[in-house]
Image (tube, rainbow, N blue to C red):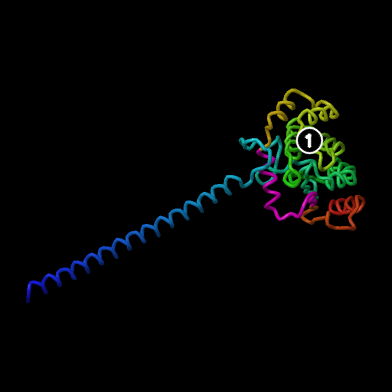
């Protein structure tokens, strides 16, 4: 073979080797890009998940969550129910309420005299659960702060009276007046013996805020349609359009026969 031919074959082999090296380099770069893009997508997803997780359950305007401190005497699952009445009563009324909720006020004004009569007679036990859905719907912190104040009143053995005062003096739904702790303390003056230093410190310090938030979470995950939710021995009587205070009284008295 002539020298010229040998040189030509060597050049062709070198060109082929160069081409193969170029292809390998391209393949490496392609793989690197794929891996890099995958990492970016995973990190992006993690960032989104992190943002969602960080904001899940946050209540607009709420302070940082502290330890969950249930009010004195709280009962039921996770200590979220404030009980009123005799434990031995044969009927139990479970009420989910929000102190900013106008429908809750309407229910209370219509039914509370009957409820008080039945609890005082030992025929009915009531379990009050507090929610903050109006804060979520309308903005503000009045539902939560009022609920915390009611829990503070429970610590002082004055829940029922203060509960009634809050609903009697409920501001319009769009007015977040209960966000003012001074107003909540002023209203405590309408309950004999409640406006004390421990009560004021409990209200101003948000002692039961995390408990209230836990209660509201239980409401949100409980499958309820709104407040008030009123269950008599497990049956939703608030959805019964034929229900009246007199009918409620009769149902409870029949259960106690």
**Nearer to me, 256 or 196:** 196
Q: Position of residue 91 (x, y in %)?
A: 80, 50
Q: Is residue 92 visible?
A: no
Q: Position of residue 247 (x, y in %)?
A: 90, 54
Q: Quadrant of residue 81?
A: top right
Q: In terms of depth relative to the viewer, which is nearer, 90 or 245?
A: 245
Q: In this view, does 121 lie to the left or right of 61?
A: right
Total of numbered circles in the picture? Answer: 1
Residue 169 included in the magenta stretch of the image: no
Residue 127, percent from left and from top:
76, 45
Q: In this view, does 67 lie to the left or right of 7?
A: right
Side (left or right) of 76 relative to 17: right
Q: Can residue 128 be seen in this view?
A: yes
* Quadrant of the rendered image containing residue 143: top right
Q: Nearer the viewer, residue 53 or 236?
A: 53
Which secondary structure lies at badge 1?
Answer: helix
Residue farthest along the bottom direction in this orientation = 1
Q: Which of 57 and 55 is in front in this view?
A: 55
Q: Residue, x 76% and y 38% (percent of image)?
A: 142
Query: Which span is picked out in magenta?
Result: 210-230
The picture places residue 214, in percent across and down from the top left corner, at 66, 43
Q: Where does label 1 land, which residue?
A: 178
Whether residue 224 is in magenta: the answer is yes
């Amino acid at each position: 073979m002539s020298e010229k031919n040998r040189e030509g074959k060597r050049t062709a082999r070198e060109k082929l080797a160069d081409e193969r090296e170029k292809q390998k380099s391209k393949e490496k770069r392609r793989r690197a890009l794929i891996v890099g893009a995958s990492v970016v997508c995973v990190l992006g997803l993690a960032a989104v998940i992190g943002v969602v997780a960080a904001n899940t359950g946050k209540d607009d305007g709420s302070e940082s969550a502290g330890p969950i401190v249930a009010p004195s005497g709280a009962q039921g699952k996770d200590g979220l129910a404030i009980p009123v009445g005799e434990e031995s009563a044969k009927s139990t009324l479970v009420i989910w309420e929000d102190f900013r909720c106008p429908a809750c006020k309407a229910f209370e004004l219509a039914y509370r005299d009957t409820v008080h009569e039945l609890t005082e007679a030992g025929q009915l036990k009531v379990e009050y659960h507090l929610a903050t859905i109006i804060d979520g719907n309308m903005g503000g912190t009045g539902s939560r702060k009022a609920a915390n104040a009611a829990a503070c009143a429970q610590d002082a053995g004055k829940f029922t009276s203060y509960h009634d005062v809050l609903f009697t003096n409920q501001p319009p739904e769009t007015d977040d007046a209960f966000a003012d702790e001074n107003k909540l303390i002023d209203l405590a003056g309408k309950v004999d013996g409640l406006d004390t230093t421990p009560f004021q410190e409990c209200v101003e310090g948000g002692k039961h805020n995390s408990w209230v938030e836990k209660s509201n979470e239980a409401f949100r995950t409980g499958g309820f349609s709104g407040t008030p939710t009123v269950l008599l021995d497990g049956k939703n009587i608030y959805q019964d359009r034929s229900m009246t205070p007199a009918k409620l009284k009769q149902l409870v008295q029949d259960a106690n026969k």
